[in-house]
Amino acid sequence: MIGAIIGDVAGSIYEFDKPKTTEFALLKKESSFSSTTVLTAAVADFSMDDRGVTSQARLCGYLHKWYLYYPNVPYEKAFELWIRDFDTVAYTGFTSCNSSGSAAASCISPIGAFANVVEQATRNAPFVAAVLHKQPEGIKAAQAIAAAIVMFRTIKDKSLLKKQLEEQYGYDLEKPVPDLAQAQQHHQTALETVPTAIICFLESTSFEHAIRNTLVLGGDRTTLAAITGSLAEAYYQDIPAALINETMHRLPEELIAVLKKFYRSQINNYPQIAVTVLNYES
């Protein structure tokens, strides 16, 4: 989860100012969280709360609650129009948001973290993603990332991971990062963003390197870096404590509280990262 948030915060200042090399400051004074962090917190909060019957309507309630905490961060237009309806409309009987982007894939990391096996992730991810997407591609993308997070925690052979993701989800993961950087598209759809994020991870040597790979590309860097960050966290299991602390320093108390609650529940899956998060003091 913190991997996705670090990616979101790091990408916030590079949306329209692409670095020319991977040697640059990940975080600057003006780095801040976006809607990706808010939605990730909502999904984590929903996943940890065992009150009542789990339902997609209840998930809508959590998304709305977290939106009301931070209504002024930038949201995708389709999502903002959709979530504002809940100011006056009940969560039951909702219609899915018609997001065309990668909203679910960028905030799905808690679902992957709580899954013990791939089958659990592939079952639970569409439950969440279908609230945010009507398009099958957006749902498939979230499913792929949740499943990948489970695989990455235990399988450390990147060639095997690449093969499994290509075969299971039909993604083309052959284009190297330098070629992606030359394209300079403004990636919006899940079909564009998710394979790119996976490639940025596959060609990395560390968590930081994975994030840097995303930031030299064009497009929606907050979403791209958040997805890559969630994968890199699961695989490397090692994020510099200074980077975690600098990121958490930029978060308000509600976000810090849900992060600490999440890592108390994930101390077996992410022992080193959990210790750093839980020891953070603002």
Image: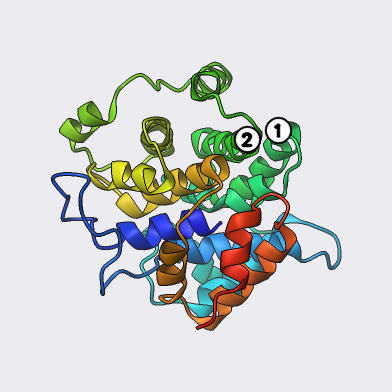
Q: Which residue is mark 1?
A: 118
Q: Secondary structure at mark 1?
A: helix
Q: Residue at x 18, y 55 (%)?
A: 16
Q: Quadrant of residue 264?
A: bottom right
Q: Is residue 153 above or below residue 12?
A: above
Give the percent coordinates (x, y) of residue 145: 55, 38
Q: Is residue 251 above or below residue 224?
A: below
Give the amino acid at mark 2. Answer: Ala
Tell me the distance, in whole angstroms, between the alpha carbons under discs 1 and 2.
5 Å
Q: Residue at x 16, y 32 (%)?
A: 182
Q: Quadrant of residue 85?
A: bottom right
Q: Could you say which disc has been placed on residue 152 in the image? A: none
Q: Earlier in the sequence, mark 1 or mark 2?
A: 1
Q: Residue at x 62, y 64 (%)?
A: 275
Q: Is residue 154 above or below residue 22?
A: above
Q: Could you say which disc has been placed on residue 147 in the image? A: 2
Q: Is residue 245 left or right of residue 94?
A: left
> How packed is label 1: few (under 14 Cα within 10 Å), some, or many (20 or more)?
some
Quadrant of the rendering where the N terminus is positioned: bottom right
> How packed is label 2: few (under 14 Cα within 10 Å), some, or many (20 or more)?
many
Q: Residue at x 18, y 32 (%)?
A: 183
Give the percent coordinates (x, y) of residue 273: 58, 58
Give the percent coordinates (x, y) of residue 107: 53, 53
Residue 208 visible in the current orientation: yes
